[in-house]
Image (spheres, helix red, strand yellow):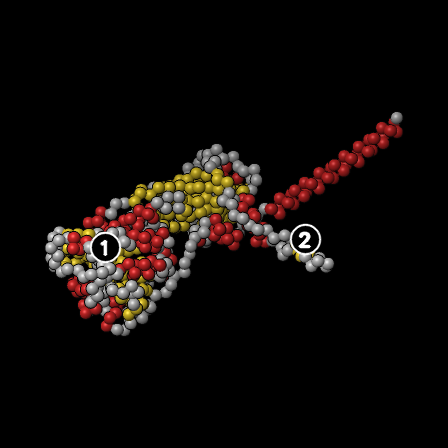
C-alpha cells in the first residue's frame, strides 16, 4: 500500500510538473504574441492610416490663370467707366511671372481662346464688346470644372442666351423674356465650393444711363492655393485684395477655410500641456491634418489628481480659427474612437513577410503555405465617450482636450483617434449681396441672379459643414 502511494505521489508530481511547464510555455507564448501584436506607431503608419480614415482630396495646383471676359455689347459702357481700375490688373495678368489664358465670352457656346498679344485681349478696349448675347453659363461651367486652377471672370452677370437687349424698354417684361433672372450659377458655384475651394467677388460700382450698377470680377481660387502661403502670395486673388479701394465691395464664399496654428510647435512636447510627461509626439504632420501623442496612464492620472495644476487639458495649445465670413456662431466638438485593433491590422498588412507559395508537381496548382497575405479592411473603431472631454478657450481661441475626472487608467495599451469637428455653424444672411449685387434698369426694374446664385449655393454647402472633421489628434495611452 505504501509503495502504491509513493507511485501515485510520483505520478502526481510528474503531472503537476507537466502542467507547470505547459502553463509557463502558454504564458511565454501569450506574452510573445502580445509583444508581437503591440503596434509600433510612427509617422509613416499614421499618415497611411489617416489617409484611409479621413481621406482628403488633395489636388495639386495647376499653374497659370484663366481669364474670361464678357464681351457682350451690354458691357461696353460699363467697362469704359472703370477702365482705369483694370489697368493694373492687365499688367499683372500679362506679367512675366504669370501664364495666362484669355477667353472670350459672348455669343459662342465654346468661349474661344484669345491671343494674349492681340488687341482682343485688352478688356479695356470698348471695340471688343460687340456680341449681341452673353452665354455666361458656358464660362462659369468651365471655370468651376477646373478644380485645381485659378480663374477670373469680368462680367456684369447679365446672362442672355438669345435676342438683343432693348436700349430703353417701356415694360420690365421685355427684359424678363431675355435676361435670365434665375439662380442659374447655383450648381456650378456649389460644385466649386463643395470641393473645398473659394469664390471671391470684387464688385465695382458703375453708373450707366443714370442707373447704379456693379461690374464684377469673380475670382475662383483652389483650396491648395489658399492654404499654400507661397502660392497665395503670387495669386491673382492676393493681387486684387491688395489693390482693393473704397469703391470696391469684396465678398468671400467658402466653407473650408480653417486656420490651424500650433502654439507649441517648436517645443519638445508640441501642443501638449507643459506639466504633462509626454513619451513621444509627432507634430510636424500638421499640414496633413493630424498630430500624435503618447502618454502613460499614471501620468494622466497624476495631472488629473494634482490639485496644484489648474489646467487639466492634456492638449492645450492648439488654435483653430475659422475664417468663414459667411458663417457665425461656429462651435467645435470632438468625436473619439478606439482604433487599436484597426491600426494594428494596418501595421501587420504593411509589414507582413512575402507569402510562401508551393506548387503541386502533379497538378501545377499553386497554394500559399505560409505568410498568407493580410487584407486590411478599415473599420472606424468603437466610439469612446468616457475618456476624453472637449474644452474651448474663448479668450485664447485654443482648442483643448481633457481626460475626464473619473479616469482610472486603461487595462491595456490603447490607441485613440480624436476628431475635432464642427458642431454648429449658422449661415449669415445675404444683406450685402441682395442690396448691392443687382442689375438695375429703367422704370425701377431690378434683378439679382448673382446674389441668388451665391446665396442658394452657400445654403446647399452649409448643410454639409456640421460634423465636418477639421483636425485629428491620435493618442496612445499605455496601461
Identify the residue shown where x is 24% and y is 70%.
120
> Would you name the residue on which mark 1 appears?
180
Whether residue 360 is visible here, answered yes or no, is: yes
In this orientation, which residue lies closer to the viewer: 231 or 424?
424
- Does 65 sit left or right of 339 as displayed? left
In this orientation, which residue lies closer to the viewer: 362 or 34?
362
Q: Is residue 319 above or below residue 240?
A: above
* Residue 418 in picture, x, y percent from top left: 46, 44
Q: Are marks 2 and 1 in contact (CB under 8 Å)?
A: no
Identify the residue shown where x is 31% and y is 71%.
96
Q: The C terminus is located in which quarter? A: top right
Which element is circle 2 on? Answer: strand
- Does 352 sit left or right of 216 as displayed? right
* Residue 100 in picture, x, y percent from top left: 31, 67
* Residue 333 in picture, x, y percent from top left: 40, 41
Could you say which disc has been placed on residue 424 in the image? none
> How far apart, in angstroms, are the residues tagged by discs 2 and 1?
69 Å
> Would you name the residue on which mark 2 appears?
369
Identify the residue shown where x is 74% and y is 36%.
19
Q: Earlier in the sequence, mark 2 or mark 1?
A: 1
Furthest-top residue in view? 1
Which element is circle 1 on? Answer: loop
In this orientation, which residue lies closer to the viewer: 388 or 107?
107
* Residue 361 in picture, x, y percent from top left: 72, 59
Q: Residues within 10 Å of mark 2 (few under 14, many from 20)?
A: few
Please state which of the two labelled residues, at mark 2 or mark 1, is closer to the viewer: 1
- Does 370 sit left or right of 311 as displayed? right
Whether residue 267 is visible here, answered yes or no, is: no
Q: Is residue 170 above or below residue 132?
A: above
Q: Is residue 92 above or below residue 397?
A: below
Amino acid at each position: 500500500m505504501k509503495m502504491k502511494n509513493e507511485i501515485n505521489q510520483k505520478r502526481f508530481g510528474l503531472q503537476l510538473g507537466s502542467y507547470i511547464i505547459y502553463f509557463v510555455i502558454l504564458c511565454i507564448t501569450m506574452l510573445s504574441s502580445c509583444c508581437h501584436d503591440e503596434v509600433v506607431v510612427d509617422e509613416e503608419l499614421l499618415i497611411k492610416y489617416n489617409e484611409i480614415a479621413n481621406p482628403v482630396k488633395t489636388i495639386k495646383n495647376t499653374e497659370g490663370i484663366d481669364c474670361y471676359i464678357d464681351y457682350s455689347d451690354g458691357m461696353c459702357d460699363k467697362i469704359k467707366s472703370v477702365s482705369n481700375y483694370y489697368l493694373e490688373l492687365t499688367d499683372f495678368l500679362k506679367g512675366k511671372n504669370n501664364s495666362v489664358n484669355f477667353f472670350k465670352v459672348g455669343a459662342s457656346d465654346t468661349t474661344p481662346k484669345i491671343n494674349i498679344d492681340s488687341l482682343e485681349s485688352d478688356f479695356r478696349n470698348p471695340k471688343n464688346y460687340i456680341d449681341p448675347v452673353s452665354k455666361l453659363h458656358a464660362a462659369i461651367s468651365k471655370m468651376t470644372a477646373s478644380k485645381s486652377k485659378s480663374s477670373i471672370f469680368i462680367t456684369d452677370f447679365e446672362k442672355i442666351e438669345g435676342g438683343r437687349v432693348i436700349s430703353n424698354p417701356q415694360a420690365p417684361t421685355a427684359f424678363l423674356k431675355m435676361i435670365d433672372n434665375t439662380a442659374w450659377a447655383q450648381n456650378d458655384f456649389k460644385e466649386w465650393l463643395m470641393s473645398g475651394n473659394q469664390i471671391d467677388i470684387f464688385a465695382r460700382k458703375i453708373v450707366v444711363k443714370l442707373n447704379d450698377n456693379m461690374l464684377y470680377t469673380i475670382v475662383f481660387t483652389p483650396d491648395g492655393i489658399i492654404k499654400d502661403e507661397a502660392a497665395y502670395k503670387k495669386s491673382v486673388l492676393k493681387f486684387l485684395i491688395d489693390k482693393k479701394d473704397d469703391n470696391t465691395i469684396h465678398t468671400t464664399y467658402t466653407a473650408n477655410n480653417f486656420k490651424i496654428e500650433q502654439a507649441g510647435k517648436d517645443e519638445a512636447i508640441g501642443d501638449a500641456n507643459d506639466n504633462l510627461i509626454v513619451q513621444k509626439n509627432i507634430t510636424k504632420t500638421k499640414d496633413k491634418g493630424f498630430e500624435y501623442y503618447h502618454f502613460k496612464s499614471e501620468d494622466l492620472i497624476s495631472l488629473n489628481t494634482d490639485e496644484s495644476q489648474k489646467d487639466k487639458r492634456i492638449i492645450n495649445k492648439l488654435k483653430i480659427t475659422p475664417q468663414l465670413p459667411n458663417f457665425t456662431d461656429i462651435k467645435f466638438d470632438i468625436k473619439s474612437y478606439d482604433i487599436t485593433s484597426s491600426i494594428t491590422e494596418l501595421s501587420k498588412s504593411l509589414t507582413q513577410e512575402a507569402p510562401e507559395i508551393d506548387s503541386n508537381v502533379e497538378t501545377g496548382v499553386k497554394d500559399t503555405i505560409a505568410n498568407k497575405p493580410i487584407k486590411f479592411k478599415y473599420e472606424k473603431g468603437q466610439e469612446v465617450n468616457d475618456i476624453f472631454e472637449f474644452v474651448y478657450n474663448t479668450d485664447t481661441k485654443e482648442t483643448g482636450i481633457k481626460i475626464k475626472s473619473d479616469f482610472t487608467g486603461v487595462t491595456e495599451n490603447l490607441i485613440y483617434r480624436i476628431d475635432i469637428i464642427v458642431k454648429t455653424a449658422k449661415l449669415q444672411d445675404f444683406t450685402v449681396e441682395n442690396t448691392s449685387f443687382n442689375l438695375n434698369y429703367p422704370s425701377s426694374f431690378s434683378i439679382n441672379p448673382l446674389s441668388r446664385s451665391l446665396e442658394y449655393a452657400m445654403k446647399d454647402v452649409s448643410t454639409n459643414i456640421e460634423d465636418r472633421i477639421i483636425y485629428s489628434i491620435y493618442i496612445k495611452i499605455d496601461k
